[in-house]
Each structure stands twice: as C-alpha cells, then as structure tokens.
Image (cartoon, grey):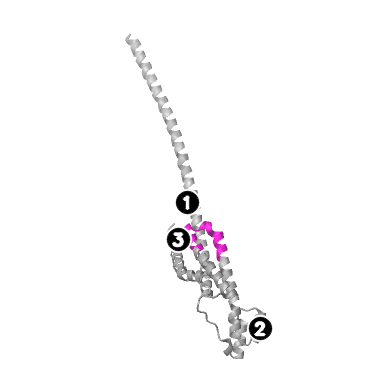
Amino acid sequence: MVAGGGLSLIIYQIFKHLAARWLDSRFDKNLQNLVHEQNKEIEQLKSNLTRAFDRVSKLHQREFEVLPEVWAKTNDAYWATRSLVASIQTYPDLNRMQAAQLDEFIIQCELAEWQKDELRASTNRTDYYRDNIYWHRLQLAQNALRTANVTLSKMAIFIRPEIKTNLEALLNLAWGAISEDEINHQHDPRPRLREDINKLNSRGDKIRSELEQQIRERLYAPE
C-alpha cells in the first residue's frame, strides 16, 4: 500500500508537472498571439494616424498656398471696383495741355488707337477722355472680378467655410455696385442708382477687414 501510494504520488507529481508545462505552454502561446494581435492593432492605428496627419498637413499646406492668391485677387477686384464707382472722380485737363504734353499723354493712355485719333481731333478732349476711359476702367474691374470669382470657385475646397462666405459676400457687393454703375453710365437714370454702390461703400471695408484678420490667423496657425 505504501509502495502503491508512493507510486501514485510520483505519478501525480509527474502529471502535475506535465500539466503545468502544458498550461504554461498554452498560456505563453496565447499570450504571444495576444501580443501579436495587439501589435498589429497598434501598427494599424499608427498607420491610420500617420495617414490622417499627412492628409491634414497636405490640406493645411494647400490652404497656405491658396489663401494668399485668393486674397490678392479679391483685394485687387475690390479696390478696382471702389475706384470705378467712387462719387468723386478726377481727370487730367487735356484741353489745357501743351501739344507735346498732350501727345505724350495720349500715347501712354489706355485708349484704343482709333480712340486716341478721335481724342486728338476732339474739340473737348477732357470730356472725350473722361467719357471713353470709363469703359476701359469698367472692363478692367469686371475682368478682375471674374478672375477673383473663378479663382475662389477653383480653390474653395481648400478654404474654411467662414472665410469663403466673407469672400463671396465681398465679391457679390462689388458685382452689385459695378452693375449699377454701368447702368448709370449707359442709361443715365434720374436720380442715378446708388443702392448697391452705397452697400459696397458702407459694408465693404468691414468685410474686407474681417477677411484680412481671418486669413492672417489661418496663415499663422500652428497646425
């Protein structure tokens, strides 16, 4: 019985040892699998974060490139319009110019060649120049507005909504004012139309100042 009991104890100890080794082996294997899966998840998370960071960085870089261009074109269009629709306009007195001075001025002015010939032959050169140079200035302002609108349309996806809203508001004010001013010169209504021109004069500078601050903050953002 003692021998049998001793043998049983020995067998038990062997079985216990083997079972412990088997359990340890299974535990180690499961632990390795768990660590491996966790490492895969961590690497996947790192990869996702890296891609997300790269996208944000590229978008911010594109925004950094786009904003100055859109701002410059919008600013040019705004001031071209403000200058065109200003209630006080100044023109050189061509009637009082000496021949050499007049000839130099006509050569350098923006009128078409046939208009320059008509200007030379005009009995009131100052009035002729004032009446005709307006349409050249109008075309320049309209072209500047179209360029600003097209640029904004192309680049809008890289611009924050609140900035885009202000850009559109400023350009819309300019379009309204320039259209109204063109009607005044084409049809000479009495009284002359001033509603949209007054809107541009009263609201334009405020929106432009807000835009300048918004764009400055985005360009200097620490992202």
Cα separation, mark 2 vs mark 1, equals 64 Å
Label 2's element?
helix
Label 1's element?
helix
Main structural element of the magenta stretch: helix, strand or loop?
Answer: helix
Residue depth check, mark 1 versus mark 3: number of the one nearer the observer? 3
Q: Quadrant of the N terminus?
A: top left
Can you give x and y, in whole percent of width and height, for residue 159 in the image? 50, 58
Q: Which residue is mark 3?
A: 218
Mark 3 or mark 2: whose residue is earlier in sequence? 2
Residue depth check, mark 3 versus mark 2: number of the one nearer the observer? 2
Can you give x and y, in whole percent of width and height, for residue 63 in the image? 50, 59
Q: Amino acid at mark 2?
A: Glu
Q: Amino acid at mark 3?
A: Arg
Q: Quadrant of residue 91?
A: bottom right
* Label 3 crowd bin: few (<14), some (14–19), many (20+), radius 10 Å: some
Mark 2 or mark 1: whose residue is earlier in sequence? 1
Circles 3, 2 touching at the beta carbon (< 8 Å)? no
Cα separation, mark 1 vs mark 3, equals 18 Å
Residue at 49% across, 63% down: 169
Can you give x and y, in whole percent of width and height, for residue 104 in the image? 61, 86
Circles 2, 1 touching at the beta carbon (< 8 Å)? no
Bounds of the magenta segment: 148-168
Residue at 51% across, 66% down: 173
Q: Quadrant of residue 12?
A: top left
Checking the image for residue 118, the label placed there is 2
Circles 1, 3 touching at the beta carbon (< 8 Å)? no
Image check: 84 left or right of 103? Answer: left
Q: Quadrant of the C terminus?
A: bottom left
Checking the image for residue 190, the label placed there is none
Q: Which residue is mark 1?
A: 53
- Find out whether residue 98 is within the magenta segment: no
For the question of whether residue 136 can be seen, the reply is no
